[in-house]
Amino acid sequence: MDEARLIEKLLAVEALHAGAATEGERVAAQNARRRILDRLRELVVEDPPIEYRFSMTDMWSRKVFVALLRRYDITPYRYKGQRYTTVMVKVPRRFVDETLWPEFQELSDTLRSYLAEVTDRVVSRVIHADSSEADVVTEPPQLKLVVNSDLDAAVSCTSTDSDTGAHRGAAKVNTAGLDQKTTVPNQASTKNRRKRQARKKQKKRKR
């Protein structure tokens, strides 16, 4: 779809919600906008405007929605402290349900489809021909290495950051079966203790 075809399709969406009956009327954007404005003026009398708060999912959707409001002479605003993606507006309920929101959804879907096609085409030409999704593989089990069976300690060699997907070499020691007061004697301290005990025995014998 080229840009000219996109514009034609967007105008057809507006004409459809304006109630165009023939193919000729669907391409008459000026007449479609005028019909929707006339409908809005009638609804303002029958159905007094109420305040709506719309929360857009992203800045791109907000830009499209705000532009559509201004096309129909509706003033968007937001209160101090509200998120930038929030759009406040006063408009009749019937106009929102029957025209404004359905038209926005169709315009948004059409634009997203066009942008997706352009992105895929540019990426495949400039960066890499294969722009398909990444492969889905089975997550490997964690590797465990026993350090000392007497102390009941084990080290987990791999961990995965769930937010970034990066693998980190973090080691986790399981010491559930280890008493904090337990000490492991080394060979040097054992020899020194035996020498002290031997000297004490020699002194006793001399006495």
Image (spheres, rainbow, N blue to C red):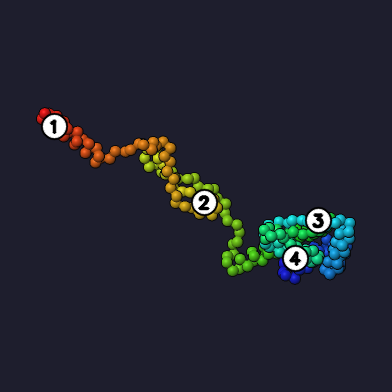
Q: CA distance from mark 1 to mark 4?
A: 103 Å
Q: Amino acid at mark 4?
A: Ala
Q: Earlier in the sequence, mark 2 or mark 3?
A: 3
Q: Quadrant of the C terminus?
A: top left
Residue for badge 1: 203
Mark 3 surroundings: few (<14), some (14-19) or many (≥20) residues within 10 A: few
Q: Amino acid at mark 2?
A: Asp
Nearest to the eye among marks 2 and 3: give it. 3
Amino acid carrying mark 3 in the image: Ile
Earlier in the chain: of badge 2 and badge 4, it is: 4
Nearer the viewer's eye, disc 2 or disc 4? 4
- Measure the C-alpha gap from mark 1 to mark 3: 104 Å
Q: Which mark is residue 50?
A: 3
Camera-side residue of 150 and 76: 76
> In 3D space, how far apart are the residues under numbered discs 2 and 4 (Cα atoms)?
40 Å
203 vs 160, left or right, is: left
Residue linked to disc 4: 67
Q: Quadrant of residue 198?
A: top left
Of labels 2 and 1, the one closer to you: 1
Residue 176: x percent and y percent? 43, 37
Left or right placement of residue 53 versus residue 192 in this view: right
Circle 1 packing at 10 Å, graded few (<14), some (14-19), many (20+), is: few
Amino acid type assigned to the residue bearing label 1 in the image: Lys
- Please indicate whether residue 151 sits to the left or right of residue 123 in the image: left
